[in-house]
Image (spheres, helix red, strand yellow):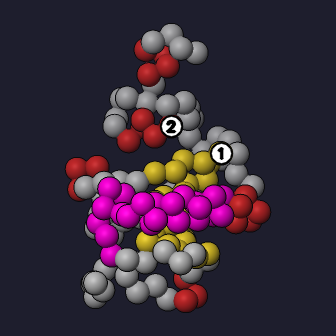
Amino acid sequence: MEHVKCPFCNPLADDILAKNDLCYARRDQFPVSRGHLLVIPFRHTPDFFSMTPEERGALVDLVASCRDLISHEFSPAGYNIGFNVGTVAGQTVMHCHCHVIPRYVGDVPEPRGGVRGVVPGKRGYCEDHNLK
């Protein structure tokens, strides 16, 4: 079902950087770093858990292709890859999308903990548990 007001349901051909039969990739309109991409199923589905197994596989394959695109253009030192599922987790567009966020040396003072940083004060688990 096409959702007219959904910003991901009707991608413009010029916005699509890569695609397969079930998903496409485009630049994030509000990037957190240079090269930040979104991988999105063509079918309107609210989140990761509502995707079919085939869509999940296609999305993961496209994430790997996006890494190649980003690496070629921007040469980042690392990546964060993830989904926001539900408004409490920060999801603002209720059409599944995966963030592929390139990371660069020095882009944050202390990157340890990675995605744990989405909950303030929880990124530094390594220091708390002497896991350095």
Number of other residues with Cα within 10 Å of mark 2, as a class: few under 14, some 14 to 19, many 20 or more:
few
Asked if residue 59 lies in the magenta stretch, the reply is yes
Q: Is residue 65 left or right of residue 95?
A: right
Q: Is residue 74 left or right of residue 127?
A: right
Residue 28 makes an appearance in the image: no
Q: Is residue 58 above or below residue 114?
A: below
Alpha-carbon span between mark 1 and mark 2 = 11 Å
Which quadrant is the C terminus positioned in? top right
Q: Amino acid at mark 2?
A: Gly
What's the residue at 50%, 73% (across, down)? 23
Residue range (magenta): 44-67
What's the residue at 44%, 22% (across, down)? 125
Asked if residue 10 lies in the magenta stretch, the reply is no
At numbered mark 2, what does the secondary structure look like: helix, strand or loop? Answer: helix
Residue assigned mark 2: 114
Q: Is residue 10 left or right of residue 67?
A: left
At numbered mark 1, what does the secondary structure look like: helix, strand or loop? Answer: strand
Q: Is residue 79 above or below residue 124?
A: below
Observer-nearest residue: 59 or 88? Answer: 59
Residue assigned mark 1: 78
- Residue 90, given in percent of the width and then of the height, sits at 30, 54
Q: Amino acid at mark 1?
A: Gly
Which quadrant is the N terminus positioned in? bottom left
Q: Is residue 29 left or right of residue 14?
A: left
Main structural element of the magenta stretch: helix, strand or loop?
helix
